[in-house]
Image (cartoon, grey):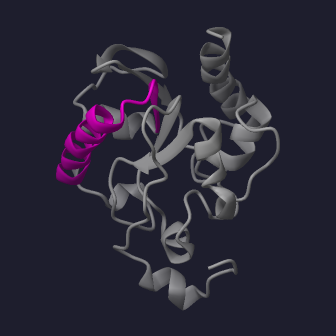
Amino acid sequence: MNKRPTRLEILEAAGKTVPDIIDFNLKVLFCGINPGLYTAAVGHHFARPGNRFWPALFSSGFTDRLLSPFEERELLKMGFGITNVAARATARAEELTKKEFIEGGKKLVDKIHLYTPEFLAILGIGAYKTAFNRPKAALGLQNETIGKTKLWILPSPSGLNAHYNNGQLTALFNELYRLITDKK
């Protein structure tokens, strides 16, 4: 779907899933909390107007232009992918249960062992804390890994996350970008 969904289409998206954008040996696999209703209605990650994922990728250097959610597969050519901790679409992440986060974390570990990205960047510190039982986690590089995959925690780019403005979000995304590009 390349058009704005109707209110009914958005409401009917509750519980739907959005396919991963994933491949083997990515530089970074970005991991959202779960799809929002708008995202599930259109079938593309971080699609809701006001979500800051795509602008943050561009302004931090990951992409050379501002991509639309409908161009999400272009990320694979750059060595990036997208998945979610929990697959079920909800209006707000708070609608997910602790059990869903924990089960999602286990599935995510299996996915990481299979695809082996260099970094897993979880976009939502609360989701990481709950899914991986890390109540004291902070943003940035984590001390643990999943196999050889390094863990990096970023704030959620959702427009509902008022704790970080666009400049702060870009700066935090840019820290990861600098780390993966300084190695070359």
Residue appearing at x 58%, y 86% in the figure = 7
How many labels were placed on the picture?
A: 0
What span is colored magenta in the figure? 99-123
Q: Which quadrant holds the N terminus? A: bottom right
Q: Which residue sits furthest right?
A: 65
Residue appearing at x 79%, y 35% in the figure = 59
Image quadrant assignment for residue 137 = top left
**x then y, percent, for residue 30:** 50, 39
Left or right: residue 157 compared with residue 111 = right
Q: Which quadrant holds the C terminus? A: top right
Instruction: Tell me if residue 48 comes above or below residue 147 in the rendering.
Output: below
Residue appearing at x 58%, y 53% in the figure = 160
**x then y, percent, for residue 120:** 43, 31
Main SS class of the magenta portion in the image: helix
Residue appearing at x 52%, y 90% in the figure = 8
| Magenta highlight on residue 115 | yes
**x then y, percent, for residue 23:** 45, 44
| Magenta highlight on residue 122 | yes
Instruction: Tell me if residue 127 comes above or below residue 15 in the rendering.
Output: above
Left or right: residue 147 compared with residue 22 = left
**x then y, percent, for residue 4:** 68, 80
